Image (spheres, helix red, strand yellow):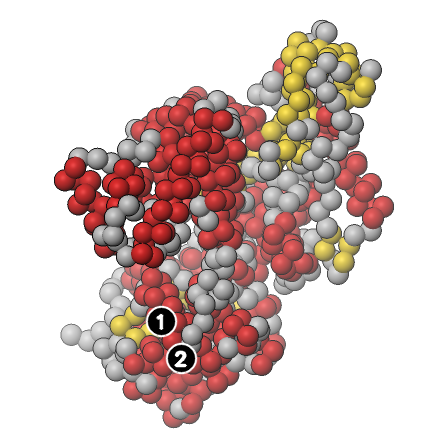
Amino acid sequence: MSNATPVIPETVEPPYLAGLNPEQRAAVTAPDGPLLVLAGAGTGKTRVLTTRLAHLLVTGRARPHEVLAVTFTNKAARELSERVERLIGRSVTGLWLGTFHAIGVRFLRAHAELAGLQSSFTILDTDDQLRLIKQVVQAAGLDEKRWAPRILLAIIQRWKDRGHAPEDVPASEVGDFAAGQSLALYRAYQQRLSTLNACDFGDLLLHPLVVLRRHADLLERYQTRFRAILVDEYQDTNVAQYLWLRLLAQRHRNITCVGDDDQSIYSWRGAEIGNILRFEQDFPGAGVVRLERNYRSTGSILGTASGLIARNQARLGKTLWTEGEAGTPVRIAGLWDEAEEARYIGDEIEALQRGGESLAQIAVLVRAGFQTRAFEERFIQLGLPYRVVGGPRFYERAEIRDAIAYLRLTAQPADDLAFERIVNLPRRGIGDAAIQALRGLSRRVEIPLLQAARQMVETDELATRTRNALMAFLGLVDGWRTTLAEAPPRELAEQILDESGYTAMWQNDRSPDAPGRLDNLKELVKAIEEFPTLAAFLEHVSLVMDAVGESGSEQVSVMTLHGAKGLEFNSVFLAGWEDGLFPNQRALDEGGGKALEEERRLAYVGLTRARHRCTVSFAANRRIYNQWSSSVPSRFIEELPAEHVEHLHRNPAMRPDAESFMDDLVVPQVARFRSRRAELGKVIEGRAEILTTPPGAGASFSVGDRIFHQKFGYGRVAAVDGNKLEIAFEKSGVKKVISSFVEAA
C-alpha cells in the first residue's frame, strides 16, 4: 500500500485551516523559504507548528521523508506526530522527527565510521562520563582534589555545546584548568571514547556537525534531502544545534523556526538567545510572523507581563493581547518573613479551594529550590495535598538526606543505615571491602556498625590507610556527640557539615546543580534552628516524610520558575520576589546586564503561567547566616505597570499587629534602597548592584534597654538574637522586631 499523502491543490481550503486567527493562518500558509514565527506565551505555538507541517505534506510541498522536524523533548515529538496524523487523517511514516539528540543518534548510526566509531556505539550516561573523565585525569598524573573531574567534564561539555571539537577550540577559551592542560585532557577523553566505541550526549550533537563540515558530498546529500525543516523552541538552541541547522538549511532555505525570544531562560545549560535574534541576518529575506493574541490569560495578567518584558533590550518585540476579559489585577503582597509568606499563600489556597477551585489548577512558583521547604511544611500542617514538580520534595533531596544521616548518627550511634550512608561521604578512603568487614563483625557480635568500627581500628584486619581514615571519622563523631550535649542544634549542624567536609565537597563541585545544593543545606540549617533539640527536629522530619505519602490525586503544584515553562494554571502564586533572590544575585554577579534580562524573562514566564489569578509576594525579612536582614522588594515589582496591579496594603492573612505593614515597613525600605542606589551610583554597564541593609544595621541593644517603636510604642528589650529583638511593649504585648526599626527611649 502506498504511503503517499493525498495532495490537494493550494486553491482548495483544507479543513484544518478553519479556526486559525489571521496571524496563525499566515504562519501556516507562508510560502517556502525561511520563516520565523515569534509565538508569545499562550498564542497557539504548537497548533501553528503542527498545522504548518500538515500543510506542507497535504499540499505536496514536501514528502514525509523530506521533512526534518526538531523538538526539545520526546513528549513534544510524540504529540507533534499524533496531531499531524489527526489533521491529515492518516498515519505518517518516514519523517525525521525527534529531539536534537535522537536525530543525532540516527545520523551517527548511519555514518558512524566517519566519526571514528562503529554503528553499534554505546551512549554513556553522566556517571559513566564522570568515571571516564576521572581515568583521564589520573592518567595525566593530576591531583583529583585540586583539579576536580566534574569541572573538567563541565568545560568539555561547554566546548561541545559550542560546536568545538578538540582541534577547533580557540586559544582564548582554554583557560587555566590544570595549568592549561584542559585541551590536552579533552583530546585524551575523546580518544578514550573512540577506543570504547562510545559517545557522550555532547557528541550526539558535535559528531554530526563535524562530519557534515568535513564531508561536502554528504552535506550536499542531506541538504538536498531535507526540503523542509521545522524547529520548535528555537530560542533554546545552543551554538552546536544552531550551526547544524544552518548547514542543513542552506540549499532549500525552507526552514521554519518557532520560538519566543521573551522566554529564553536556559543560558545556564547552553541556550543562546542570539540564535533567534539574528535569524533575519542568517537568512536574508526571511518572513517574520508575530503571534500576539493570547488564549490563556486575562488582560490584566497580559498587561503586567508585557509591561515588564518591554524593559528588555535584547528582544525582537511583541505585545500580547486578548479579546477576553481584563480580570482582576495582579496582586502584590508584602509579608513579614518567609514563614508569614507561606502562611498567607496557604490560607489563600484554602480560600480558593473552598470557592470551588481545583488544587490541580493552583501553582506556587519560586526562583530557587530551597524556597519550597517553607511551603511544603505549611501545606503539610494545613493538610493541603501538594507535589514538587521537576524534583524531589525538600527532605527527599540527596544532599538533605546525606546531611540528616550525619545528624541521625550523631543523635543515635546505633543507626546503621545512617552510618553506611555517610561513612565514606565525602570519600575518605573507606571502601566497600572495609564496610563489608564491618558488617561481618556487626552481625557476628550483634553490635552496631559504629561500635564494630571502634573495635576494628584497634586490630590489623584493615589496611593502615583505611584504619587511619576510619579512626579519623570516629574522632569526628565523638566530637559531634560532645557538641550535641553542649550547643544548640543549629551550631551542631553547622559544625558537622563543616568538619565532615560535606559542604566543602559541594563548594568544590562545579556542576550546575552544586550552588542549589548548597542553598538547600543552608535552608536545612535554618530549619533546624526552629527546634529546641536535635531529637525534636529529627522527629519532625520523620513525621513530615510520613505525611508525604498521604496526598490524594488533586495536588497543589510547587516548582521553580524554570520548571514551570510550558505549563499553565488558573491561579499562580509567585513567591520570594526580593532583590538578591529574584533577580538572583549569583546570576547577576556572573552575567551582568545579560543575566538581568534573562531574570526578567524568567519573571515574564512566571506571570504568563496564570490564566485567571496571579499573586506576587515578597518577604520583608529573611534569616541568613543566623542574622535577620531586611529584604528589598524585587526591582521587577517596581517595573510592573501600575494600571494592572494591586498592592495589598492591608493583608487579612497577616498578623493583626502588621496591618500597616506596607506603610510602616515596606515603603520606607524601598525609599532607602532607591536613595542608597542613587547616592552610590553603582550602575556598571547596565547592571545595578544589589544594595541592601546589612544584618545588624542600626543601634545595638541589650536586655533591659527601653526603646520606642513607631507603631507599637514604648517597651523594654526582653531578648536579643543577632539583630532581631524580642520586646515587651507596654501596650502591645511581646513582639519580635528588627533592631533597625526601634530607637532608644
Q: Quadrant of the N terminus?
A: bottom left
Left or right of 255: which side holds 302? right
Of the residues shown, which amino acid type is indicated by label 2? Ala
Q: Position of residue 12 (x, y in %)?
A: 39, 68
Residue sitting nearer the eye, 42 or 510? 510
Q: Quadrant of the C terminus?
A: top right
Residues packed near mark 2 inside 10 Å, few (<14), some (14 to 19) or many (20 plus)? some
Q: Position of residue 185 (x, y in %)?
A: 44, 77
* SS of the residue under disc 1: helix
Q: Earlier in the sequence, mark 1 or mark 2?
A: 1
Instruction: Give the residue displayed 21% in from the left and 50% down from the top.
Output: 436
For label 2, the residue is 188
For label 1, the residue is 135
- Which is in the foreground here, disc 1 or disc 2? 1
Instruction: Give the residue displayed 31% in from the left and 29% down from the top.
Output: 546
* SS of the residue under disc 2: helix
Residue sitting nearer the eye, 60 or 482? 482
Of the residues shown, which amino acid type is indicated by label 1? Gln
Instruction: Give the image quarter of residue 618.
Output: top right
Instruction: Give the residue displayed 68% in from the left and 58% down from the top.
Output: 593
Instruction: Give the residue displayed 52% in from the left and 72% down from the top.
Output: 178
Q: Position of residue 208 (x, y in %)?
A: 39, 80
Left or right of 120: which side holds 271? right
Instruction: Give the image quarter of residue 542.
Output: top left
Q: Is residue 517 visible?
A: no
